[in-house]
Amino acid sequence: MIIYKTTCLINNKIYVGQDSKDDSNYFGSGIYIRNAIKKHGKENFKKEILCECFSKEELNEKEIYWIKKLNCKSPRGYNIANGGGGISGHQFSKKSKKKISKIMKEFSKKPEVIEFRRKNFLGDKNPMKRINVKEKVSGENSPTKRLDVREKMSKNHANFKGENHPNYGKHLSEETKKLISKNHYDISGDKNPMKKVENRLFGDKNPNSKEIICVETNTTFKTITSAYKWLGKGDISSCLQGRQKTAGGYHWEYLKNMEVKNDTIQKS
């Protein structure tokens, strides 16, 4: 396992990478170095071994070290990240983000892509709907119920208590407190929208509320709620909708319906 340096003989830009197989024909897999080799030709690049490593951890550490030492991150070199087996430290420009977003949107709209997703991921083919997948991650099989996972979670949580917490001993400045306060809406007291009952269209203030009447007592109520408070039991709503005959031992009707019935009786 080695850390190598690939140098462009035309512009002297370099690329640092790791090679676990020590392949002399492998010059790097980063997008910038690949584009450069495609542009200038492989014959215009030279590969040199910087150091030898004996573990994956050491390989990652040395890669980070040499990229920083030789200062070969783009635009000075062909590396796009800090090294260590990933793209950590790399930040795409707004132009690159827009370009990537545009490409992905266009790709997802292609008929063949839509058809592929429809055949392989919809309905019962959705991997999250498969019974075996559900069984593996639900109920007693949930990772959070495994002893080793719970012990690891508990240990990690303990490491951030008290003095081990990254914010232990730190205090917010007055400027930061004012900024946080400014960005929070004041919903205290009467400003709380949940307390502005008078502005809500509830009960008899609702223009769609209908008056009802207890047939036996001839008592009228502006809303079902007020009738229920008087009655104290029974499902008046079901009675009004015809699902049951009585509620609380009484018959109930909408006042308008009752008036129409009385007018019809008088006319007949």
Image: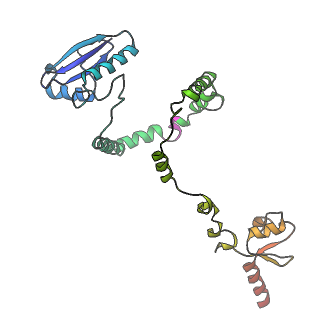
Q: Out of 82 and 146, give the one closest to the viewer.
A: 82
Residue 184 relative to residue 99: left or right: right
Can residue 224 be seen here? The reply is yes
Instruction: Give me the residue at 60% from left, 60% from top.
Output: 192
Please tell me whether residue 81 is drawn above or below residue 189 in the rendered image: above
Main SS, magenta region, reads: helix
Residue 173 relative to residue 11: left or right: right
Q: Which residue is the extreme one toward the left?
A: 10
Residue 190 relative to residue 211: left or right: left
Horizontal and vertical percent for residue 245? Answer: 82, 68
What colouring style does the render use? rainbow
Q: Is residue 96 magenta?
A: no
Question: What is the quadrant of residue 220 in the picture?
Answer: bottom right
How many numbered discs? 0
Q: Out of 158 and 153, give the one closest to the viewer.
A: 158
Q: Which quadrant, please, contains the C terminus?
A: bottom right
Horizontal and vertical percent for residue 82? Answer: 33, 26
Instruction: Give me the residue at 37% from left, 9% from top.
Output: 54
Horizontal and vertical percent for residue 88? Answer: 36, 29
Horizontal and vertical percent for residue 195? Answer: 64, 62
Q: Is residue 126 magenta?
A: yes
Q: Out of 244 and 146, give the one closest to the viewer.
A: 146
Q: Out of 107 and 93, give the one closest to the viewer.
A: 93
Please tell me whether residue 253 is drawn above or below residue 90 in the rendered image: below
Instruction: Give me the residue at 36% from left, 26% from top.
Output: 86
Can residue 142 be seen here? The reply is no
Question: What is the quadrant of residue 140 in the picture?
Answer: top right
Please tell me whether residue 192 is drawn above or below residue 153 in the rendered image: below
The magenta region covers 122-127
Q: Which quadrant, please, contains the N terminus?
A: top left
Question: What is the quadrant of residue 233 in the picture?
Answer: bottom right
Instruction: Give me the residue at 69% from left, 70% from top.
Output: 203
